[in-house]
Image: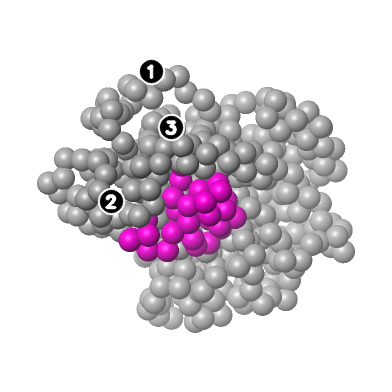
Amino acid sequence: MPTIRDYADIAGKGAIEELYLLADRLSGKVVQNVNSTAVGGGVAEILIRMLPLLRDLGVDARWDVIKGDERFFATTKKIHNALHGVAVDINEDEFAGFLETNRMNASGMTFGDVVFVHDPQPIALIEERPQAGGRWVWRCHIDFSRPDEHVWRFLKTYVDRYDSAVFSAPAFARTLSIPQVLISPSIDPLSDKNRDLPAETIDGIFERFGIDRSRPVVTQISRFDFLKDPVGVIKAYRIAKRRVDCQLVLAGGGATDDPEGPAIMKQVMDEAEHDKDIHVLFLPPASDIEINALQRGSTVVLQKSLREGFGLTVAEALWKSCPTIAGAVGGIPLQIKHKYSGILTHSIEGTAHWIKQLLQEPAFARRLGQNGREHVKNNFLITRHIKDYLLLFLSLYHPDDIVYL
């Protein structure tokens, strides 16, 4: 793991010194993160990279992962989909089981001075606040622009009991009785997933997966989740391929709190069957070098999400100067300015059109990639993210300084 001073060449020495000054103000405070999975998905990935850097700054940062059975995670997946606007049926027994699992986890936990709860799964831990004390923040990483009202009313009774709520994009703000803070996620430019790679490493990984680098490669790297629309990606690729020669790579894995992954993976395999130019790769945890190489070696990168909290795979691709096409949903428009730092699309047909355009106009594609990298450097690196979190934690002790959305 790099130290925080290793980022000075990218973020600037002054930015690093500022982080030390802010962290010093939190001396003696325990900052406790709580989420529902240690492996898979953007939340776990951010915490894995960020916590060692916070500790390097002198912050006593900790991380707890709640436990649950299959029924609990089936319910939380329904809640996740409902908050993305998908019609679901959650009955009172499922809500009761959800609360019981939260209470069971709370009974075995010791809470810090700042309790930073990520996403809906552990939201009801706030019931412990009267006994535990401290400051509590709920951090929502998902696309909250059109939530199912029934599910949102259930969750809101808990959200309103926190000190503040954090969202990734202005469109996710809700009517709440507590302050709402905008903090975009980030990538770590020195991680295995984002650091520079030698050409021979990239070539070797493409060869291992049987992908021909002498022909254009279009790639989407995401969890196998229907909201990432992998089947729609295949359809867009097939439309584009009528006009331009290309291959498609769909690569990703699952998360331990997502029970739908295997079924989506099967749909993708069925849709891709008999097409030797479609490479479906199920990547296990710790495949960061492979993901890095696949993005760097691709001609075009896609992120055709139907809903998206932020979509860090977009920032990852842009950081590598990859021409990127992504759905105009959630936090993605914060990362891509259409036709400047990437391409925003709204449909399968639109995605196919821009695949064709970027493959036929390499100079334009290259310019998009260059602009995208500069945008990520200025806005979505981990050092900026850490600064935002330190300011948030400090503001909990100075509530008049909180910035509302």
Q: Is residue 49 visible?
A: no
State the CA–CA distance, disc 2 to disc 1.
Answer: 30 Å
Residue at x 51% of width, y 81% of height: 149
Q: Nearer the viewer, mark 2 or mark 1?
A: 2
Vertical placement of residue 238 versus 213, above or below: below
Which type of secondary structure does the marked residue at label 2 adopt? Answer: helix
Query: Do tag 2 and tag 1 residues touch (Cβ < 8 Å)?
Result: no
Query: Do tag 3 and tag 2 residues touch (Cβ < 8 Å)?
Result: no
Q: Is residue 249 visible?
A: yes
Vertical placement of residue 14 versus 300, above or below: above
Residue toward you, 103 or 202: 202
Residue at x 35% of width, y 55% of height: 353
Apparent side of residue 115 relative to residue 240 in the rendered image (left or right): right
Kind of residue indicated by mark 1: Glu
Q: Residues within 10 Å of mark 3 (few under 14, many from 20)?
A: many
Kind of residue indicated by mark 2: Ala
Q: Which residues are magenta?
A: 322-351
Kind of residue indicated by mark 3: Arg
**In the image, residue 327 lies in the stretch drawn in magenta:** yes
Residue 352: % across, % down? 33, 54
Give the number of marks.
3
Task: Name the residue that disc number 1 marks.
Answer: 200
Apparent side of residue 18 relative to residue 248 in the rendered image (left or right): right
Reading the chain from its start, which is encountered first: label 2 or label 1? 1
Residue 80: % across, % down? 46, 65
